[in-house]
Amino acid sequence: MSTASTGITRRALVNGVAWSVPIILTSSAAPAFAVSGSTGTGNVACSASGMTLQYTATTTDATRNAAGTLYAITVPANVTSICYEVLGGGGGGGFTAAAITNGGGTTGNGGNGAFVTGYVTFAAGASKAIGMIFGGGGGGAVKAGGAFYAARGPNGYGGGGRCFNSGSNWYPGAGGGASALVSSGTVKTAPPFAVAGGGGGAGTFALTTTYGTFTGGGGGDAGAVAQDGHNVIVTGTGTYQSYVVDGGGGASGATGGTWGLGLTSPTTGNSGAAGGNHGVVGGGASGGLTNGGGGGGQGSAAYGVGGGGGGGYAGGGGGASQTTAQTIARINSAGGGAGSSWVDTAAAVANTITTGTISTAANAGVATNGAAATANLAGQGGDGYVKVYW
């Protein structure tokens, strides 16, 4: 008998904090978000500060609604302090149709995006032009003409990693795009004040017999530490061998996450792609969907296909996938790693002081298992946003 489980990663958690800068981190600053597909509610820190919401960039805004686009705003000369809220896109959940859930397996959920909030203080003087870029939620399966297709990774400050079509009944999730508040209204690659990483996309599974239970790995959560995508541990008995399907690595500061490594024995596997480093335009094999931050790594091709990595200050790696070379046709794929988040506490932007907290939101795409999906974007992660108050 074979079993599978998720949530175990082989990388040490300490790798995710090697880039640490002196920022204030908290696990309680995130607002209470709704389930998959929500862009969430306002953060108490800004709304309780006595400041007024001035600008929002997200898909539901009337004018600033295109993910990955730089929207310029002007801070008046008499305003010397602003409060910001930045939410990264959630990773897409996997989709597995009823036709291939014979063994009772489950497909992974996407990873949550990061939530970053804080203040920027400017030197007194002239007005200031700054920019807002929000990341889209990672897609699940896209329905078109009655058929489903794997979603392309969304745009963002760092784009989410895409994933491949894998068959007619199972699809992984793309990574979420990163959101950012940057120090220019015209240059996307200008130093950012704050970046919220996107969550990793989920892996999926397929099983063509009634034997066993198999699972797709969930995407990694973005936050103070960008998590790895979840591995899948398959335990075999007799002629059914054990193996590990490797999740994509979470990004660390300006360095993209490692790719999920596909095995060559005892199964046939495919590796994901590494996440893009900070400042590498088009990095991360995510279709060039980057503009300053690192793109998420592309999930592995074929055999269940791995989840895409989340975009961020640097991008998360894409997950691997495996299929058996044995009698039972069983396919498992791991989740993508999350993108890293960032706060400019080192004052890289001249004449400013930036403070902030980084936490994990709750806007991951939820898996669809054992049923025909009805939405055009089954498992869609929640879109990110940028809000500015003064």
Image (cartoon, helix red, strand yellow):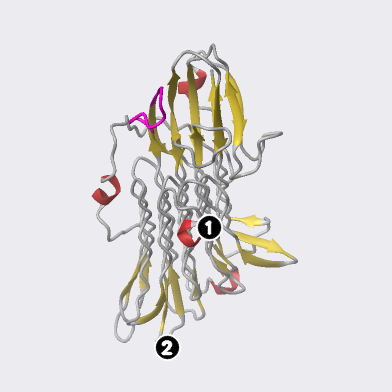
Q: Is the magenta stretch mostly helix, strand or loop?
A: loop
Determine the image quadrant of residue 234. bottom left
Dot 1 or dot 2: first in sequence order is 1
Marks 1 and 2 sit apart, C-alpha to C-alpha, by 31 Å
Q: In this view, does 318 lie above or below 270?
A: above
Residue in view at x 48 percent, y 41 percent? 362
Q: What residue type is labelled 2?
A: Thr
Q: In this view, does 134 lie above or below 111?
A: above
Q: Which amino acid does label 1 sit on?
A: Ala
Image position, residue 193 (x, y; %): 44, 32
Mark 1 highlights which residue?
174
Mark 2 highlights which residue?
327
Residue in view at x 57 percent, y 43 percent? 383
**Quadrant assignment for the N terminus:** bottom left
Image position, residue 275 (x, y; %): 42, 57
Residue 266 visible in the picture: yes
| Residue extent of the magenta highlight | 344-354
